[in-house]
């Protein structure tokens, strides 16, 4: 009598079941990582857009003159002698009539504070900008932010 032993049907079912369980867990982890990656890319894109808008504003403010602050609006004469206006309208930051921020960046507050811009003062002109709002981090998800930056006039106004 030959004693040929092989895998029994029960051993085969257990092996396939364990393999299926491990592959299901690995696939779930992979899908979670894809979701986190998309969320991170979305936040990064929004913050990069906000960074571009702030850099554009501060560059114009640094090289400009004749500052005028009116709450959430700010006017400056740029280096070319043109008047540039920054404002918050419908949760988007505008430079004159062109939007600087993407709709994925929902700006709820834009404040300008100027120092040393009155005639006869002894301070160098500078502006502080505070922006707060939310940035899209995926379908139906947002992340809050508050950013503060400053710009000092390059030329002397003293």
Image (cartoon, rainbow, N blue to C red):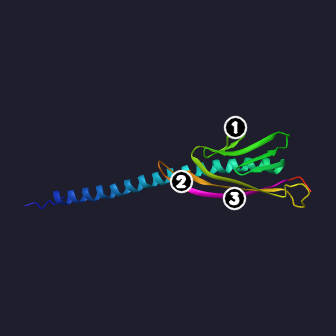
**How far across and down, in percent of the image, does residue 41 sit?**
55, 50
**How far across and down, in percent of the image, does residue 113 sit?**
75, 56
- The residue wearing badge 1 is 97
- The residue wearing badge 2 is 40
- The residue wearing badge 3 is 148
Q: Is residue 142 magenta?
A: no
Q: Is residue 62 left or right of residue 27?
A: right
Q: CA distance from mark 1 to mark 2?
A: 30 Å
Query: Is residue 40 at all visible to an observer of this figure?
Result: yes
Q: Nearer the viewer, mark 1 or mark 3?
A: 1
SS class, disc 3 = strand
Mark 2 neighbour density, 10 Å: few (under 14) some (14–19) many (20 or more):
few
| Mark 1 / mark 2, whichever is N-terminal | 2
SS class, disc 1 = loop
Q: Residue at x 75, y 43 (%)?
A: 85
SS class, disc 2 = helix
């Amino acid at each position: 009598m030959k004693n040929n032993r092989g895998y029994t049907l029960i051993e085969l079912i257990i092996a396939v079941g364990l393999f299926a369980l491990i592959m299901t867990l690995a696939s779930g982890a992979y899908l979670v990582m894809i979701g986190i990656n998309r969320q991170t890319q979305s936040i990064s894109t929004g913050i990069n857009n906000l960074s571009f808008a702030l850099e554009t504003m501060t560059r114009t403010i640094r090289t400009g003159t004749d500052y005028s602050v009116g709450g959430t609006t700010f006017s400056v004469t740029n280096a070319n002698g043109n008047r540039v206006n920054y404002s918050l309208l419908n949760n988007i930051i505008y430079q004159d009539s062109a939007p600087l921020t993407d709709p994925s960046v929902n700006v709820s507050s834009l404040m300008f504070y100027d120092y040393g811009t009155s005639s006869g003062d002894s301070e160098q002109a500078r502006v502080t900008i505070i922006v707060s709002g939310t940035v899209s981090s995926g379908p139906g998800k947002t992340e809050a932010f508050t950013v503060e930056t400053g710009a000092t006039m390059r030329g002397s106004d003293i």
